[in-house]
Amino acid sequence: MSKNQIKTRAFTKNEVKRIETYMRGIGTKTSSRDIAIFRTAISSLLRVKDLLSLKTDQVVFNEEVRKQFSVKQMKTGKKVEIELDETTIKALEDYLNSKPEQTEYLFTGRQSKSSGKPITDILWRKALKKYCKNVGIDTIGISTHSTRKTIATILGNQGKVRAVQTLLNHSSLAHTMKYICLDEREAFEVKREVDF
């Protein structure tokens, strides 16, 4: 199977915890930023281009991280509503408190030539794969899109496909069904809940 044929997979809950624990153990400004990116990517279900293009004033108001905000998706041009969980809000607060100054873009580079500019999807992909390797996660099928698929797959495996469709802003339920990584074993578990 070629690299282009490998299907992007979601992270498991265990993998998310392992990556976050590792990032927190590093304890640098870069790891603070990367935890915030990782958490926001999972919580928001945004595509990487939309995620890394977030502007600080979209997410922060009166020096507080917003629980809810909206984003116009680059790929579709459609507006999507975002709601962040408390863990993500805390990660963003920690990251913002570690930044020497607020910048136009939320997730910025650390080097002087890229300071103030958003980090690139290439840089984030390399960092994410490095974190995965460092905690022993096989990176086959892992990409920046894996974060978008994580909650979608968990909810899909719980049978909450309409919720996934709404969160991903898909216009077609059929597209959502193809998108989520529905595990056959978990599908049967959901089915058993409604058997009578």
Image (cartoon, rainbow, N blue to C red):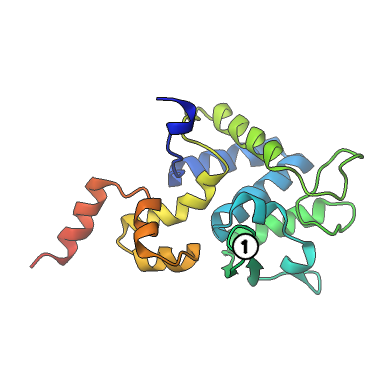
Q: On screen, 24 above or below 92? A: above
What residue is at 58 percent from the left and 57 percent from the top?
Answer: 46
What residue is at 65 percent from the left and 67 percent from the top?
Answer: 71
Report the label total: 1
What residue is at 54 percent from the left and 46 percent from the top?
Answer: 145
Residue reaching furthest to the bottom: 62
Picture quarter with the N terminus: top left
Residue reaching furthest to the front: 76
From the viewer's perspective, is 154 left or right of 3? left
Q: Position of residue 117 (x, y in %)?
A: 84, 49
Identify which residue, 83 or 104, lies in the foreground: 104
Residue reaching furthest to the top: 1
Residue carrying label 1: 73
From the viewer's perspective, is 107 left or right of 25? right
Picture quarter with the C terminus: bottom left
Instruction: Name the residue type under label 1.
Output: Gln
Identify which residue, 193 or 8, lies in the foreground: 8
Q: Secondary structure at mark 1?
A: loop
From the viewer's perspective, is 15 left or right of 189? right
From the viewer's perspective, is 171 left or right of 96? left
Q: Quadrant of residue 19?
A: top right
